[in-house]
């Protein structure tokens, strides 16, 4: 009988192969996505460096880079947090294209934040 075991972290999978040997264990195809594409000005936590296995510039999209994580859960966490957060360069590009852009407040100041578009202006004031 054969058993398939899936690890979130490729380091754990490598340890399993090493411990069980090739007689009992064979590497299978990767399941899950370990890479995240980020804008060149995106910020990430220095504590997360230990969880990153590789960093490459994205040749298909100038100004972006690709992080490859050891663990698919870390990659998903970064993907979720950076897809929702507009970057400075993204906001500047939107302004240059004449599109409305909203730059969100820094972490810790989100409570009660309303984008300018949704705030009623005081009488006599006009948006610029």
Image: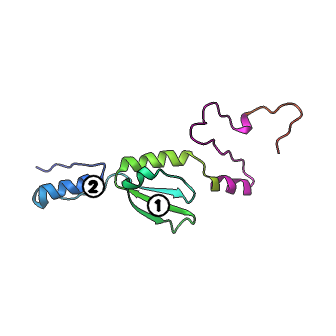
Q: Secondary structure at mark 2?
A: helix
Q: Residue at x 60, y 32 (%)?
A: 111
Q: Is residue 107 magenta?
A: yes
Residue 103: which quarter of the image? top right
User: Does residue 25 show up?
Assistant: no
Place of residue 86 in the rendered image (x, y in percent of width and height, measured from the top left):
60, 48
Residue 40: which quarter of the image? bottom right
User: Does residue 59 show up?
Assistant: yes
Q: Residue at x 20, y 55 (%)?
A: 15
Q: Which residue has dot 1 on it?
A: 66
As drawn, the residue found furthest toward the bottom would be 59
What's drawn in magenta, residue-wise? 90-118
Does label 2 or label 1 sit earlier along the sequence? 2
Q: Is residue 107 above or below residue 25?
A: above
Q: In the visual, does 48 lie left or right of 13?
A: right
Place of residue 72 in the rendered image (x, y in percent of width and height, measured from the top left):
36, 50
Q: Is residue 30 magenta?
A: no
Q: Residue at x 72, y 51 (%)?
A: 99
Q: Is residue 122 above or below residue 5?
A: above
Q: Residue at x 25, y 52 (%)?
A: 12
Numbered-mark total: 2
Q: In the visual, does 45 lie left or right of 63?
A: left
Q: Which residue has dot 2 on it?
A: 11
Alpha-carbon span between mark 2 and mark 1: 19 Å
Which quadrant is home to the C terminus? top right
Majority secondary structure in the magenta region: loop
Residue 55: which quarter of the image? bottom left
Query: Does the residue at mark 2 contact the one at mark 1 (Cβ under 8 Å)?
Result: no
Place of residue 98 in the rendered image (x, y in percent of width and height, measured from the top left):
75, 53
Q: Is residue 112 above or below residue 65?
A: above
Place of residue 33 in the rendered image (x, y in percent of width and height, measured from the top left):
38, 53
């Amino acid at each position: 009988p054969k058993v398939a075991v899936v690890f979130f972290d490729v380091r754990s999978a490598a340890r399993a192969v090493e411990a069980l040997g090739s007689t009992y264990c064979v590497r299978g195809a990767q399941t899950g996505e370990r890479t995240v594409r980020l804008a060149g000005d995106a910020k990430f936590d220095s504590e997360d460096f230990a969880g990153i296995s590789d960093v490459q510039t994205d040749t298909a999209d100038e100004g972006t880079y690709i992080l490859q994580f050891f663990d698919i859960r870390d990659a998903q966490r970064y993907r979720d947090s950076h897809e929702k957060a507009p970057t400075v360069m993204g906001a500047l590009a939107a302004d240059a294209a004449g599109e409305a852009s909203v730059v969100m407040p820094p972490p810790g100041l989100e409570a009660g934040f309303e984008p300018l578009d949704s705030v009623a202006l005081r009488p006599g004031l006009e948006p610029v």
